[in-house]
Image (cartoon, rainbow, N blue to C red):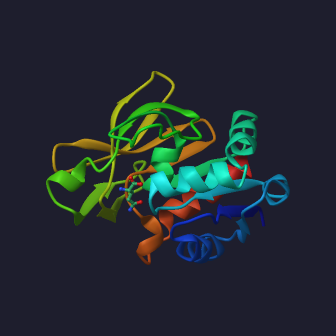
Amino acid sequence: APTIGVLALQGDVREHARSLERAGATAVAVRRPAELEAVDALVVPGGESTTMWKLAEAFEMLEPLRIRIKSGMPTFGSCAGMIMLADRIEGGVEGQRTIGGIDMVVRRNAFGRQVDSFEATLDFAARGEIRAVFIRAPWVESVGSGVQVLGVAEPGDRIVAVRQGPLLATSFHPELTGDTRVHSYFVEMVREH
Ligand code: GLN
């Protein structure tokens, strides 16, 4: 089984670890550069991207994360994790930085202005309908030509799931539902890599 780290600076680490294990991976927490070196792939969880960014800098993890992602490590970010994987963000706080990797613009708290939390049904990566949970969720404002759209959601037919090579990101939280299809999709990406 592939060993997949969950970035454990902040956010819903345990829920992702459980979903990864159910999808057939070995999940470990990653807080330090040495732990990052030891994993085949990484999940950046949901939580709060401003806090995650500050902790990533404080733990001297931002550069190591950038380097490994640039070198092709499969990585999946959900919600705040999607924000962390965006090359560009809108609605960030002063000075907010991301890890980057996916050629897209992500708008923080985009759905939040209309409705704080909601669920929607969407077709994920043409694998059938899934229930998606959105919590003060971002949406993808625009993507570069190398980015595949894997899911759109009401309201507004917004882009909420994308993939660029070995990088996957969702606005919603598949780790909070019993459905492990998104995690299985990611584990398959890691196996193919
Ligand atoms: N609004 C949060 C942020 O900007 C993301 C919310 C979430 O991860 N549920 O980081």
Residue 42 visible in the current orientation: yes
Find residue 78 and report its horizontal and vertical position in percent: 47, 56
Q: Left of 100 or right of it: where is 133? A: left
The number of discs equals: 0
Seen at 16% across and 43% down, the residue is 156
Quarter in which the C terminus is drawn: top right
Residue 78 in view: no
Q: Which residue does the image show at 34% across and 46% down from the upper left?
A: 108
Q: Give left or right: position of 30 versus 187.
A: right
Q: Is residue 72 above or below residue 177?
A: above
Residue at coordinates 31% horizontally, 63% vertically from top-left?
Answer: 135
Left or right of residue 71, residue 43 in this image: left
The answer to whether residue 67 is above or below residue 129 is: above
Q: Where the N terminus falls, by quadrant?
A: bottom right
Which one is nearer the viewer's eye here, 95 or 157?
A: 95
Q: Position of residue 38 (x, y in %)?
A: 85, 58
In the image, residue 148 above or below residue 73: above
* Residue at 61%, 58% in the rendered image: 43
Q: Position of residue 74 (x, y in %)?
A: 67, 46
90 and 115: which one is in front?
A: 90
Q: Quadrant of ligand 1?
A: bottom left
Q: Position of residue 114 (x, y in %)?
A: 14, 54
